[in-house]
């Protein structure tokens, strides 16, 4: 849901220096950005970040999703889109592989037509070898998912106990330059940030200690007809 996505993104933007711990009713410890920090972050990404509410009817319909992306690009000038994940899209027909191929093709066409970047999350196949380097065959579903993409990234956990790193980001496919490789990273559970050395890198909302006055409301695109004239 949109509220959870926003909460996670806010924690990432805040960083570990600006979150406070608390304990849930189940005894789990969680970290939440301070209210004054959340207010500054909301002002910083106002008119820059939009989250679609996947609880809205028809939001999982690929045609509705693409129509919303066109609308967001045209009205709000959005040029970076994240769809998480492919399996949540209700693709038509009984042949899921052809449907996946067609949907990815539509995303590629949209990206090229609008000069946008579309990040489509697709999970790895179950039962694969987690220790080997990633490749395009790791992606669950049609091979056309990766064949049609311009770039392919893989994110996986590092399970070795003696490793100082928690995760690995791999560049598996790079059509623009051809170079591939990987970066090992650490994970900070307080802020949900991946990092190399220091998790306290600054985001744009930090204005050299200056506190921004007021608070803007966060925009959630609902996908309803009155919000989207392209539906």
Image (tube, rainbow, N blue to C red):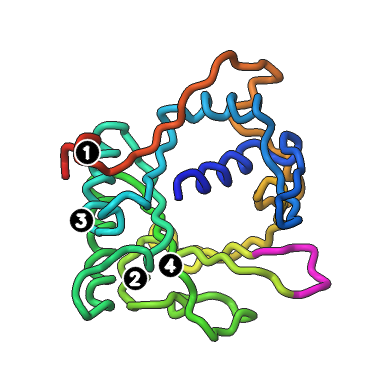
Q: Residue at x 67, y 34 (%)?
A: 202
Say which label, 3 or 1, has the lower sequence index.
3
Q: Which residue is label 1 attached to?
A: 228
User: Element type at marker 3?
Assistant: helix
Report the disc number at residue 63. 3
- Residue 74 is left or right of residue 186, and the answer is left
Dot in front, 4 or 1: 1
**Furthest residue to the left?**
230
Q: Residue 208, percent across and down?
A: 69, 20
Q: Which residue is label 2 attached to?
A: 145
Q: Residue 157, percent across and down?
A: 65, 69
The alpha-carbon separation of the residues under discs 3 and 1 comes to: 13 Å
CB contact under 8 Å: marks 2 and 4: yes
Dot in front, 3 or 4: 3
The alpha-carbon separation of the residues under discs 1 and 2 comes to: 28 Å
**Furthest residue to the right?**
162
Q: Residue at x 58, y 25 (%)?
A: 39
State the predominant SS element of the stretch in magenta: loop
Q: Which residue is label 4 attached to?
A: 122
The alpha-carbon separation of the residues under discs 3 and 4 comes to: 19 Å
The alpha-carbon separation of the residues under discs 3 and 2 comes to: 18 Å
The crowd level at tag 3 (other Cα within 10 Å; few <14, some 14-19, many 20+) is some
Say which label, 3 or 4, has the lower sequence index.
3
Q: Give the answer, above or below, for where 166 lies relative to 227.
A: below
The crowd level at tag 1 (other Cα within 10 Å; few <14, some 14-19, many 20+) is some
User: Element type at marker 2?
Assistant: helix
Q: Which residues are magenta?
A: 160-167
């Amino acid at each position: 849901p949109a509220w959870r996505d926003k909460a996670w993104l806010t924690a990432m933007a805040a960083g570990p220096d600006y979150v406070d711990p608390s304990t849930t009713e189940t005894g789990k410890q969680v970290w939440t950005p301070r209210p004054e920090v959340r207010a500054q972050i909301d002002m910083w990404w106002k008119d820059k970040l939009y989250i679609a509410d996947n609880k809205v009817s028809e939001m999982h319909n690929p045609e509705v999703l693409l129509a919303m992306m066109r609308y967001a690009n045209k009205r709000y000038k959005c040029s970076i889109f994240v769809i998480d994940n492919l399996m949540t899209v209700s693709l038509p027909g009984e042949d899921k592989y052809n449907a996946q191929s067609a949907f990815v093709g539509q995303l590629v066409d949209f990206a090229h037509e609008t000069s946008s970047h579309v990040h489509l999350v697709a999970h790895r196949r179950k039962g694969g070898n987690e220790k080997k380097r990633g490749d395009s065959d790791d992606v669950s579903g049609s091979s056309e998912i990766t064949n049609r993409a311009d770039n392919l990234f893989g994110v996986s956990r590092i399970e070795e106990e003696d490793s100082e790193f928690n995760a690995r980001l791999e560049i598996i496919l790079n059509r623009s330059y051809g170079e591939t490789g990987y970066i090992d990273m650490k994970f900070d559970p307080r802020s949900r940030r991946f990092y190399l050395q220091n998790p306290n890198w600054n985001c744009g909302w930090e204005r050299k200690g200056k506190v921004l006055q007021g608070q803007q409301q966060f925009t959630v695109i609902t996908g309803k007809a009155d919000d989207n004239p392209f539906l």
